[in-house]
Amino acid sequence: MLKQILFDENGNWNAFSAKHKKKIRFVVIKEVEKYRKCGDPRNGFKVFVCEGCHDIKWVPYRCKGRFCTTCSCGETEEWSRLMCEDVVQVNHRHVVFTIDEGLWDVFLRTENC
């Protein structure tokens, strides 16, 4: 859906990037361009062939970009899975202490003790 909005016949992304070219960081433009090409077989693909029935499946390469709604979702899920294996399997408690703003000078002075 996002791809349709950005790259439809109205050229929304092109118009936006032309208008705000000086304000958009290079990394943002790079990620959006990766997203535009994500899943396009013209950028490369893998071919899988079933040894039994000889069915062929063409799988285009993905961009693995942070902006991509397909690729970044998979990366996030993989990160969550790894964190569950590492963190949740142990007994732990999460405690957050807050310090009053007026006491920050005291804690910053005694930091190197």
Image (cartoon, grey):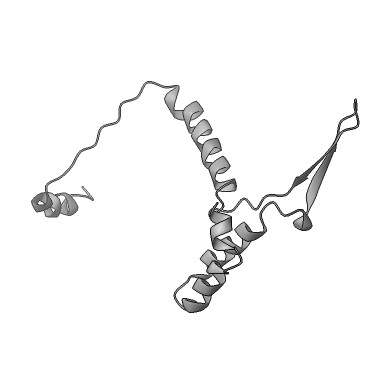
In the rendering, at what x and y percent does residue 48 appear?
Answer: 83, 38
Give the residue drawn at x 48%, y 78%.
19
| Left or right of 90, for residue 75 | right
The extreme left residue here reads 102
Relative height, residue 4 to residue 90 (above, below): below
In the rendering, at what x and y percent does residue 44 appear?
Answer: 78, 54
Relative height, residue 57 to residue 42 (above, below): above
In the rendering, at what x and y percent does residue 34 appear?
Answer: 63, 60
Numbered marks: total:
0
Depth check, front residue: 49 or 13: 13
Give the residue drawn at x 24%, y 36%.
96
Give the residue drawn at x 34%, y 24%.
92
Depth check, front residue: 63 or 10: 10
| Left or right of 89, for residue 46 | right
In the rendering, at what x and y percent does residue 65 appear?
Answer: 58, 53
Give the residue drawn at x 18%, y 42%.
98
Depth check, front residue: 42 or 77: 42
